[in-house]
Amino acid sequence: MVTPDTSQRPRLPVAVGIGIRPGTGAERILRAIRSVVGDTTITCLATLDRRATEAGVQAAAATIGVAVVAFTAEQLAAVDVRNRSHRTADAVGTPSVAEAAALLAGNGELVCGRTIVDGIVIAAAAVPRS
């Protein structure tokens, strides 16, 4: 388990990208998100399309009060990210889920790169104010 650096938590609203294994529960997802972004305002949860319908993801989003934004593996693979995983690419068809999803959903810069908490990958991208 990685201990997130809480001094670097984002101050702007963020889109949170998540990478999970099938069957991951909402409580684990919520704990992982909050350990990384704290009480920062979250605008959405973003992930791979085949994970977006998972009960845990849907319940976590409902608890936070945000939508789940889904992207295909092809959309995610087209995003230039800091961290790439060959294992993830082999498993789901894209070398990044959390970072790429956060960047696509947030339309801002990555403010928290790939962080693994209890087997869940979390990343956050700033959501520019309009």
Image: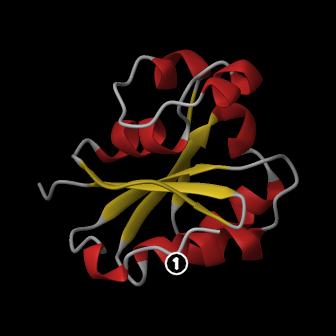
Asked if residue 66 lies left or right of residue 62, the reply is: left
Quadrant of residue 41 in the image?
A: bottom left
The residue type indicated by label 1 comes to: Arg
> What residue is drawn where x is 35% and y is 40%?
103
Pinpoint residue 102: horizontal percent, then vertical percent. Answer: 41, 46
> What residue is drawn where x is 22% and y is 46%?
108
Pinpoint residue 28: horizontal percent, then vertical percent. Answer: 74, 72
Q: Which of the pair 4/98 is nearer the observer?
A: 4
Name above or below for residue 25 compared with residue 54: below
Q: Which of the pair 92/104 is nearer the observer?
A: 92
Pinpoint residue 94: horizontal percent, then vertical percent. Answer: 59, 22
Question: Which quadrant is the C terminus positioned in?
Answer: bottom left
> From this viewpoint, which residue is outermost toward the left?
130
Question: Which quadrant is the N terminus positioned in?
Answer: bottom right
Task: State how the image is colored.
Answer: secondary structure
Helix, strand or loop status at disc 1: helix
Name above or below for residue 36 compared with residue 44: below
Pinpoint residue 74: horizontal percent, then vertical percent. Answer: 54, 15
Dot 1 alpha-carbon crowd within 10 angstroms: few under 14, some 14 to 19, many 20 or more? few
